[in-house]
Amino acid sequence: MKRLSATGDTIVEVLIAMAIVSLVLAGAFASTSQSLTQARQAQERGEAAQIARGQLEIFKSYMKDNAAAVTSPSSPATFCIDDNRTRRTISNVTDHGTYPAQCRKGISNGEARYHMSVRKVSAENFVVMARWDSLGMATVEEVKINYRLK
């Protein structure tokens, strides 16, 4: 009887090779997914910072004519200044539903993503803040810019 020579791979070798390839692909997928998430977060933060700087510029312009009204002890602690230079009171910065429509910026999917506010810390110190719900995450992100009157 003639014996056939076997030169092919065994099933065990094929399974080991498939497992190694699967591990490499899973690692690449996880790395790519994490990179995309970090890029999206950086884009959101950059856009929020730009909108907050815009709110700060509007606030500075508003302060030239209305400093006494904003710095007085009876003025609201948290507000925003809309594009028409009108001050809008915000009752609760943690509840996005309480923000006036004029304090919302950055339209995404027909809805404003960023909620703007200016918080009076003292008569001469203010914090300009942009808050938003992070895409794909259940967290609220924020960018703060501290401003001190001269």
Image (tube, rainbow, N blue to C red):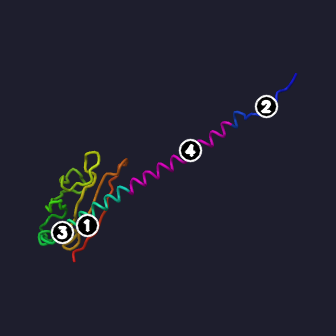
Quarter of the rendering containing residue 2: top right
Local crowd size for mark 2, using a 10 Å CA cut-off: few (<14), some (14–19), many (≥20):
few
Residue range in magenta is 14-42
Q: Residues within 10 Å of mark 3 (few under 14, many from 20)?
A: some
Under circle 2, the secondary element is: loop
What's the amino acid at mark 4? Leu
- In the image, residue 19 lies at what x, y percent? 62, 40
Measured Cα–Cα span from mark 2 to mark 1: 76 Å
Q: Position of residue 135 (x, y in %)?
A: 35, 49
Q: Mark 1 or mark 4: name the one nearer the start of the chain.
A: 4
What is the quadrant of the C terminus in the image? bottom left
Between 3 and 137, the one nearer to me in the picture: 3
**Mark 3 / mark 1, whichever is N-terminal:** 3
The residue at which mark 3 appears reads as 61
The residue tagged 4 is 25
Name the residue furthest top.
1
Q: Position of residue 108 (x, y in %)?
A: 29, 48
For the residues marked 3 and 2, what is the alpha-carbon distance in whole angstroms?
A: 85 Å
Q: Alpha-carbon distance for marks 3 and 1? A: 16 Å
Q: Earlier in the sequence, mark 2 or mark 4?
A: 2
Disc 2 to disc 4, C-alpha distance: 31 Å
Q: Which of the two marks, 3 or 1, is nearer to us in this view? A: 3
> Across the whole image, how many numbered discs are drawn on residues?
4
Residue identified by numbered label 2: 6
Residue drawn 35% across and 55% down? 44
The answer to whether the residue labelled 3 contacts the one labelled 2, judged by CB atoms less than 8 Å apart, is: no
